[in-house]
């Protein structure tokens, strides 16, 4: 099974009451979120907002690659939070 061409989830339930939103944003909006150059990143995980942001101008394959990358960051941060960290 391949994820190419399928839509990203809008929300991911990580269990134990943790839910992560997934939002497609413009390149300019992502630059503002990250406070960096417009071409610097394809996506971002924001632990304060429990949200993964992904540039909407990416191909479906690039979106999925970015989604999985940012989801790993989210899982790591949520696991730390659940153990009393961050």
Image: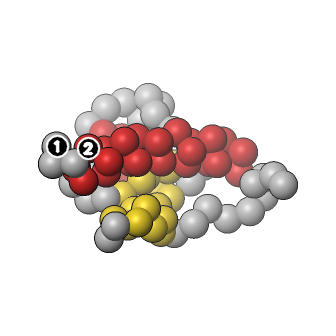
Residue furthest out toward the front = 83
**Quarter of the image holding residue 32?**
top left
Element at badge 2?
A: helix
Q: Quadrant of the C terminus?
A: top left
Q: Which residue is nearer to you in this view: 37 or 50? A: 50
Residue 1 in picture, x, y percent from top left: 84, 55
From the image, tell me which residue sits under label 2.
80
The answer to which of 11 and 39 lies nearer the viewer is 11
Question: Going by the image, does 12 lie left or right of 20?
Answer: right
Q: Identify the residue shown where x is 41% and y is 66%.
A: 15
| Circles 1, 2 touching at the beta carbon (< 8 Å) | yes
Q: Residue at x 43, y 62 (%)?
A: 14
1 or 2: tag closer to the N-terminus:
2
At horizontal 46% and vertical 56% (from top left) the residue drawn is 25
In the rendering, at what x and y percent does residue 76 appear? 37, 42
User: Which mark identifies residue 85?
Assistant: 1
Residue drawn 75% across and 54% down? 3
Report which quarter residue 13 is drawn in.
bottom left
- Which percent across, then down, holds residue 48? 21, 54
SS label for mark 1? loop
Image position, residue 81 (x, y; %):
22, 50
């Amino acid at each position: 099974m391949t994820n190419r061409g399928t839509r990203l989830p809008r929300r991911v339930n990580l269990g134990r009451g943790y839910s992560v939103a997934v939002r497609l944003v413009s390149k300019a909006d992502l630059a503002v979120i990250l406070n960096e150059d417009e071409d610097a990143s394809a996506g971002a995980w924001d632990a304060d907002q429990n949200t993964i942001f992904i540039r909407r101008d990416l191909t479906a394959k690039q979106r999925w690659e970015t989604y999985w990358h940012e989801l790993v960051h989210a899982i790591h941060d949520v696991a730390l939070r659940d153990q009393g960290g961050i």
